Image (cartoon, rainbow, N blue to C red):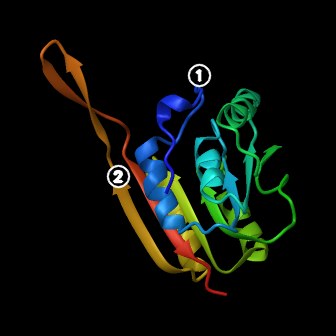
Amino acid sequence: MKIIKDSDFLREKVPMTKEEIRTISMSKLELNDKDIVLDIGGGTGAMAISMAINIPNGKVTTIEKKNEAIDLIYKNKEKIKVNNLQIIKGLAPNDLDKSKINKVFIGGTFGKMKEIFDYLDEYLIKDGIVVLNFITIENIYLATQELKKRKYKEIEIIQATISKGNLINDLTLMKTNNSITIIKGVKNG
């Protein structure tokens, strides 16, 4: 798996899925070269771009509603030179294409969890994989309820807390980022 460092992305004040969390999430997506992937809540584009470079014969579509984030996705796409990434400015699921996909990464729902899963009922193929990342208990609960209600199989819930050492004089202080809960499900039917 090819990994892009956090420092390679332009970020400004837009949320970004960090390198270690991207790595875990992509491993749970089980990416293959010809996958058709949807990224909901594009942020800086870090996750979409990371997926795209790992599936050169596949396609990644990312959707993001905030203008500042859309601008960053375009800049990061150009900086990292990714050709198989489509960018949609809009809100999922209303502004999404009506085409089949086999992998989905969800990093933000803007309160549309149920509607997004309704969309996946129709457009995520059987045995398609969905991976979701959340920091709030409420979204973790809503996502797991939707996966269970819709009879997804192989549901996994992982909580990751990443700490990195920062040098202060001759000492190292471990600085911890927010814990991220990574949820995986495989569509049953």
Name the residue beneath numbered marker 2: 160
In-image side of 46 versus 140 (left or right): right
Between residue 138 and residue 66, name the one nearer to us.
66
The residue at 12%/20% (across/down) is 171
Residue picked out by circle 1: 12
- Residue at image position (56%, 34%) is 15
Q: Quadrant of residue 73?
A: top right
SS at mark 1 in the image? loop
Quadrant in which the C terminus is drawn = bottom right
Q: Nearer the viewer, residue 180 or 34?
A: 34
Element at badge 2? strand
- Which comes before the other along the chain, label 1 or label 2? 1
Query: In the current view of this chain or complex, which residue is farthest to the top?
Result: 169
Q: CA distance from mark 1 to mark 2?
A: 24 Å
Instruction: Say which amino acid is labelled 2.
Output: Ala
Give percent across and percent down for residue 117.
68, 67
Q: Residue at x 48, y 66 (%)?
A: 28
The numbered mark at residue 56 is none
Q: Return the x and y of residue 54 as percentages of the image width and height.
A: 59, 56
Disc 1 packing (10 Å; few <14; some 14–19; many ≥20): few
Note whether 177 is above or below 183 in the view shown. Answer: above
| Residue 108 seen in the current view | no
Q: Amino acid at mark 1?
A: Glu
Tag count: 2
